[in-house]
Image (spheres, coloured by chain):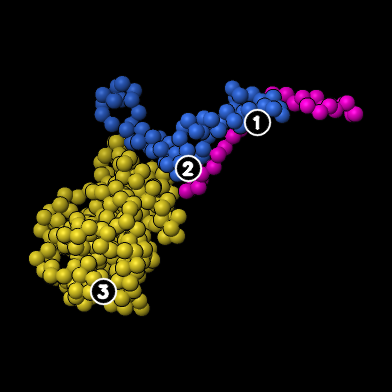
Chain colours: A yellow, B blue
Amino acid sequence: MPAQVITITSGKGGVGKTTAVANLAVALAANGSKVVCIDGDIGLRNLDVILGLENRIVYDIVDIIEGRCRLKQAMIRDKKLPDLYLIPAAQTRDKNAVSANDMNRLAKDLRSECDYLLIDSPAGIERGFKNAIAPADRVLVVTNPEVSAVRDADRVIGILEAEGKGPAALILNRLNPVMVKKNDMLSPDDVLDLLAIELIGIVPEDEGVIVGSNRGTPVASDPKSKAGQAFRNIARRITGEEVPFLDLDHSGGLWDRIQKLAGRK
Amino acid sequence: MSFIDKLLGRKPSADSAKERLQLVLIHDRTDLTSSELESLRDDLIATISRHIEIDVSEMQFGLEHDGRSQRLVADIPIKRVPRRRAKGKSKAR
């Protein structure tokens, strides 16, 4: 079966897009899917360091597009997972080196090579973002429970609808259940109420995410990490499995409501 | 929410965030500023007032959202319908 192309975007920078791509890629590949991820952030590449593959880069996406290497030469195989590959962004070029047509062509060539093609979109709503969503079959929007991130997510969701790429699904990242309980953080209910889109996962704030990026080992491969578990669950939902949402609040009430909202109950 | 906030009767910050976002998102989605909305309201009042007398003080006017779609909602109480003109006596303005 040809690959599904999934683009991960957010509008605002720094909400955890690249971390989400790395973790979903690891979780999908660990479950036996063949995964290729593309870093779409030309000039500001980062997916390589999050995956711990920065020392293996020889060719990048612009080398493929400009014909300096074959597709397979720019696909870097992961250290541990033999079914996970990265196509890195070019670091010394700008976003104008790639067009939406280039991305469509690249995705078309990769569809027969894998089960899932994950594209890490740059922040913003300009060319790099437009390139990243061009070949997408499905778009996941990452946001944080915070006013500026939610506002930007809403803008992006609106653009995706207008471009015929909707409906997007939401990853609510860095939720702090203690703050939600104290009413000092937007709850998942609040965010879903505001954005009115489908929820595909809630990732709790977890120091392990930073430790994982320090080491170049995404938390999805850590069986004890809560954030890792959340990403593994999202990966299973991507493959079409019904997975209940994590119970982060021990009283259960809030999370019951979220599950209902997300139609999981 | 801190003890001091509660003491001062301040509302939880998550509630402020949600209320502020609700307004901002409606304006972002419709690309209408508050002042444009205000002038739309004034135009609507002027137009309707040419036909019937309305109670502007009780009028409700604003944007509401239903999922991801927006609607403009106006609830305008009518004060008094002018008596129908007598037959044959209608005069052009």
Q: Is residue B59 or residue A158 the one in the foreground?
A: A158
- Where in the figure is residue A40, as x and y percent of width and height? 26, 61
- Distance Cα–Cα, label 2 vs label 1: 23 Å
- Residue A241 visible to an observer of this rendering: no
Give, as a three-letter code, the residue at label 1.
Thr
Which quarter shows the C terminus of chain A? bottom left
Answer yes or no: do the residues labelled 2 and 3 have beta carbons within 8 Å? no
| Subunit of label 1 | B
Figure label count = 3
Give, as a three-letter code, the residue at label 2.
Thr
Q: Which residue is mark 2?
A: B30
Q: Which mark is residue A34?
A: 3
The answer as to whether the residues below labels 2 and 1 share one chain is yes
Q: Secondary structure at mark 1?
A: helix
Q: Is residue A179 or residue A38 the one in the foreground?
A: A38
Q: How would you rate the neighbour count of disc 3 (Cα within 10 Å): few for under 14, some for 14-19, many for 20 or more?
A: many
Q: Which residues are magenta?
A: B65-93
